[in-house]
């Protein structure tokens, strides 16, 4: 009954969940997250100076997930179902799909900006791939190969940026809705919970702790995109906030 309800009332959310699940299974079938995985090379989001970068990756990366952690897929799809279903019912199918894709796309651009900042010294001080082509001595050729391998293995996957856009829109539309977040023993209003989540991503992106492989700025970019869109839409269509 619940599946039929999703199929009838929120087909975009349902189909997005199905697509992400199918892609996840396909990733597992073709080698998971290994550095030599051609699926990652083709469809994950790479640094713009990488030989593996293709513009379409700004879209395809949002349908892939880390196969080393099932919870990456699970929590993203749970958030999409929990918050996206309400937004699709509120906006309609077409508007929600447009919103979701724009948030995911702009999250990808935010991650590209993060790549540019993190690798600025390599890309603009004589060690970028384009500049390194002219370096012929053995040491610089070694750097070139190592940097190319680093770029190939440094990629981004996940629907989190688009999901953060949905969360931001939900918090703006239903700011006073109470959420129970484990293990916090009391309810928190949506506007504070989502604000704290975004602040956490900003902090995580700025500090970038060792071993942290979360694309924090992609999350922030998706959230900002979602907030801007929902504010713009509500300027001409005032609704009662809850």
Image: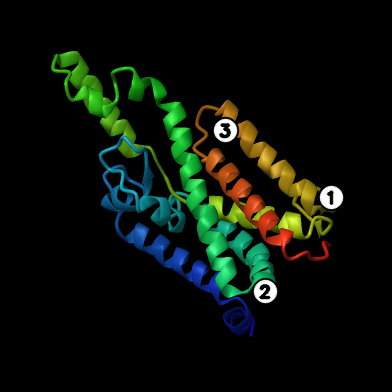
Query: In the rendered image, which quarter is residue 74 located in?
Result: bottom right
Return the residue nearer the eye: 157 or 167: 167
Q: Residue at x 55, y 29 (%)?
A: 208
Is 120 drawn above or below residue 226 in the view shown? above
Q: Residue at x 52, y 47 (%)?
A: 107
Q: Is disc 2 placed on a helix, strand or loop?
A: helix
Label 3 CA crowd tier, 10 Å (few <14, some 14–19, many 20+) = some
Residue to which mark 1 is pinned:
185
Q: Residue at x 64, y 50 (%)?
A: 228
> Label 3 vs label 2: CA separation?
33 Å
Query: In the rendered image, which quarter is residue 171 located in?
Result: bottom right
Residue to which mark 3 is pinned:
205
Return the residue nearer the eye: 233 or 41: 233
Residue to which mark 2 is pinned:
89
> Label 2 vs label 1: CA separation?
30 Å
Q: Is disc 1 placed on a helix, strand or loop?
A: loop
Judged by depth in the image, the label closer to the viewer, 3 or 2, is 2
x and y percent of residue 187 in the render? Answer: 84, 53
Do the residues under discs 2 and 1 have CB atoms within 8 angstroms?
no
Image quadrant holding the N terminus, namely bottom right
> Label 3 vs label 1: CA separation?
28 Å
Query: In the rendered image, which quarter is residue 53 located in?
Result: top left
Visible residue check, residue 136:
yes
Visible residue check, residue 159:
no
In screen coordinates, is 146 left or right of 59? left
Return the residue nearer the eye: 183 or 82: 82
Label 1 CA crowd tier, 10 Å (few <14, some 14–19, many 20+) = few
């Amino acid at each position: 009954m619940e599946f039929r309800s999703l199929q009838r009332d929120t087909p975009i959310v349902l189909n997005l969940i199905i697509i992400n699940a199918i892609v996840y299974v396909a990733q597992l079938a073709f080698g998971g997250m290994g550095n030599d995985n051609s699926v990652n090379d083709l469809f994950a989001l790479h640094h713009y100076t990488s030989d593996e970068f293709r513009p379409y990756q700004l879209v395809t990366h949002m349908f892939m997930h880390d196969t080393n952690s099932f919870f990456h897929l699970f929590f993203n799809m749970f958030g999409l179902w929990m918050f996206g279903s309400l937004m699709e019912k509120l906006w309609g199918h077409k508007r929600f799909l447009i919103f979701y894709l724009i948030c995911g796309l702009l999250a990808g651009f935010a991650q590209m900006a993060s790549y540019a900042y993190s690798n600025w010294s390599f890309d603009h001080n004589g060690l970028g791939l384009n500049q390194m082509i002219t370096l012929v001595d053995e040491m610089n050729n070694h750097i070139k190969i190592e940097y190319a391998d680093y770029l190939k293995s440094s990629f981004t996957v996940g629907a989190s940026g688009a999901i953060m856009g949905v969360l931001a829109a939900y918090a703006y539309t239903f700011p006073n809705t109470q959420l129970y977040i484990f293990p916090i023993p009391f309810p928190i209003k949506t506007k504070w919970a989502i604000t704290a989540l975004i602040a956490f991503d900003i902090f995580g992106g700025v500090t970038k702790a060792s071993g942290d492989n979360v694309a924090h700025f992609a999350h922030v970019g998706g959230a900002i995109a979602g907030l801007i869109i929902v504010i713009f839409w509500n300027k001409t269509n005032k609704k009662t906030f809850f």
